[in-house]
Image: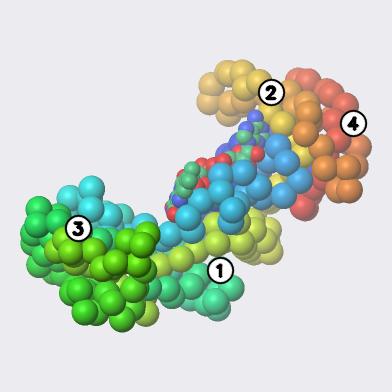
Amino acid sequence: MNPSTYDVLIIGGGISGAALLYTLERYTDLGTLCLLEKYGAPATLNSSATSNSQTLHCGDIETNYTLQKAAKVKHTAKMVEKYCLQHGYENDIIYAHQKMALGVGYDEVNFMTKRHEEFSTLYPYLKIFDRDTLKRIEPAVLYDADGEERLEPIVGVGVQGEYTTVDFKRLSDSFVENAMQSGSKHTDVFFNQHVMKIAKRGEPTSIFSVPSVSTAISPASSTTCSKSPISATTSCETSSSKCRG
Ligand SMILES: Cc1cc2nc3c(=O)[nH]c(=O)nc-3n(C[C@H](O)[C@H](O)[C@H](O)COP(=O)(O)OP(=O)(O)OC[C@H]3O[C@@H](n4cnc5c(N)ncnc54)[C@H](O)[C@@H]3O)c2cc1C
């Protein structure tokens, strides 16, 4: 039977909500967890494969990061990489691709060269690509629209053979699936649940009442339930599909 209250209720099954569900399921002693998602599957919006560049930002070529910020981001990006490797998701969810940032013109070449020196302490694998190397590995960046070689100084700073690319939709799916499969807690995931309102109900045990009215239904996966999966006080007719109860 589904509880009418949960220790944690997560609204939204994009990469953030899915990662939180997995983390709470795997690494806390909370007893009951629930995720509500408006659409019929995790990560169909910003986290879908076609809505972002699928880059695992770890700070090595993000030229707007300080070294201190890069160190923090590297730590969290490595968690994603380790998770994927632990589960054997290489070339399925996580991929190793070449990536680089370019400096064009004297100022940018100086900046990138100094940055490479500084950031190599944190990322020993970081490479610097001179004009001849770029001609070989990324020839298109050396030539203008007429096919003439560009004359400005140019340098690339980047990586080869590192894990750089993540399908955040597939990663979200895996977080939800692995959280559901673990079985160490009562974990519910409800799709086609559009949360319309969040209201405080009192301290500290009953936190939220969530009258759930679905406005975005995937007909193929919808079933009818007679009351909201969450609210103890409201009862509403809603179309829903559920991973597990
Ligand atoms: C052009 C572009 C390129 C990008 N490239 C990268 C990149 O290379 N690397 C990177 O790390 N990031 C990148 N990003 C950013 C990244 O896509 C987002 O930061 C990330 O997808 C946000 O995830 P999220 O889970 O917070 O939000 P979402 O993926 O939008 O998930 C939110 C979820 O909440 C659900 N929801 C919303 N309201 C309700 C409600 N009321 N009730 C129930 N459910 C609800 C939605 O249906 C959705 O599933 C890029 C972004 C853009 C725009």
Q: Nearer the viewer, mark 2 or mark 3?
A: 3
* Whether the residue under disc 4 has CB within 8 Å of ligand 1: no
Q: CA distance from mark 1 to mark 4?
A: 37 Å
What residue did someone put label 4 on? 226
Amino acid type at image mark 1: Ile
In the image: residue 41, left or right of residue 22: right
In the rendered image, residue 6, in percent from the top left (x then y), is placed at 64, 38
Q: Secondary structure at mark 1?
A: loop
Amino acid type at image mark 4: Ser
- Label 2, residues with CA under 10 Å away: few <14, some 14-19, many ≥20: few
Between 158 and 222, the residue placed more toward the observer is 158
- Label 4, residues with CA under 10 Å away: few <14, some 14-19, many ≥20: few
Which of disc 3 and disc 2 is earlier in sequence?
A: 3
In the image: residue 159, left or right of residue 130: right
Seen in the picture, residue 91 relative to 104 is either above or below; the reply is below
Residue that appears at 88% across and 42% down: 219
- In the picture, the disc for residue 10 is none
Q: Nearer the viewer, mark 4 or mark 2?
A: 2
In the rendered image, residue 160, in percent from the top left (x then y), is placed at 33, 77
Which of disc 3 and disc 1 is earlier in sequence?
A: 1
Q: Nearer the viewer, mark 1 or mark 4?
A: 1
Q: CA distance from mark 4 to mark 3?
A: 62 Å
Which of disc 2 and disc 4 is earlier in sequence?
A: 2
* Whether the residue under disc 2 has CB within 8 Å of ligand 1: yes
Cβ atoms under marks 4 and 2 closer than 8 Å: no
What residue did someone put label 2 on? 196
What residue did someone put label 3 on? 104
In the rendered image, residue 75, in percent from the top left (x then y), is placed at 31, 60
Q: Would you identify the image quadrant in which residue 143 lies?
A: bottom left
Between 241 and 136, the residue placed more toward the observer is 136
